[in-house]
Amino acid sequence: MNANRGGSLVAVVSGLLLISSIFFGGDWIPNSRTVAALQPASATPDERGAKPDSYLYYGPNSLWKHWHDPPSESDKDKSTPPVARLGRDTWIHWTWGNQKFLRKVAVLAGNLPIPISIDFFRALDSRNRETRFRDLGLINEPNCERNGVPDEYGFYLDKWRGDPLGYYPGDPKYKEKYPLYYPGTKELVDERHYGRPSGVIGLRLFDNPKFDVVAKKKWSLQAYFKNPGLV
């Protein structure tokens, strides 16, 4: 997945922050494997500590060992670790078009008689990565790091380190091994829906198709922060 800084502002940020029930899917009922994996950790060190910092291991305890188990007749549809994996992916990646909605909100708010500045890039300022949860309740996405160098548009965005195992939706290696389909179909997922990592779980970066050559020449960081809806 491309996390280059060159397209970062051109990006529209989308907030997901879904209700936790979506993580495991509405009426999710854990099966024996999932229950075992969710038990409180013992005094034994988590074996993931000796493994690469890969998205493969994101999730409670040992569920990662069963992310790609084949379907079992004894498992109910919404009780398996593979379904929990899809819930995890939804929580972190899927925005369902919210980036368009949030940009529209910024434009409408910025054009009110008394303008209101609605902007997410301040929340994403990488210089505040260590205090995001304390200050804003935002959860940092693992495998990203603090970045003290602004991009070409003046924004400080976290640097995504990439996945050492290629296990990340949007990575060519992931698609080759674990092709993604829309639920109940054999239609491959359009990976543009995933955006790029912003460094915060639930917030993704998307290129803004309206940020063209003309818009780039007019770009002003000061004007943007004064009223994002007018830029």
Image (cartoon, rainbow, N blue to C red):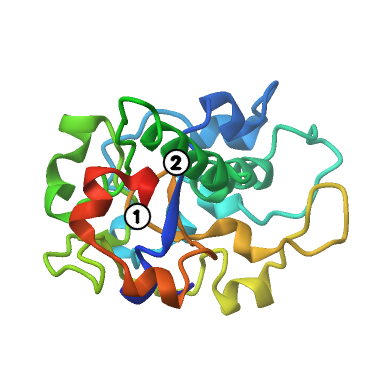
Residue 102 spot, x, y in % from top left? 48, 40
Which of the two residues, 41 or 77, is positioned nearer the viewer here? 77
Marker disc for residue 47: 1
Residue 162 lies left or right of residue 123; in this view the side is: right
Amino acid at the residue labelled 1? Glu
Q: Which residue is mark 2?
A: 107
Taking 192 as reference, is 107 above or below it? above
Corner quadrant of residue 126: bottom left
Which of the two residues, 174 or 193, is positioned nearer the viewer here? 193
Corner quadrant of residue 169: bottom right
Amino acid at the residue labelled 2? Val
Can the viewer see residue 122?
Answer: no
Which of the two residues, 217 or 19, is positioned nearer the viewer here? 217
Task: Give the Cα distance between marks 1 and 2.
Answer: 48 Å
How packed mark 2 is, by other alpha carbons closer than 10 Å (few <14, some 14-19, many 20 or more), is many
Can the viewer see residue 154?
Answer: yes
Q: Residue at x 29, y 63 (%)?
A: 50
Residue 229 spot, x, y in % from top left? 38, 44
Residue 187 lies left or right of residue 103; in this view the side is: right
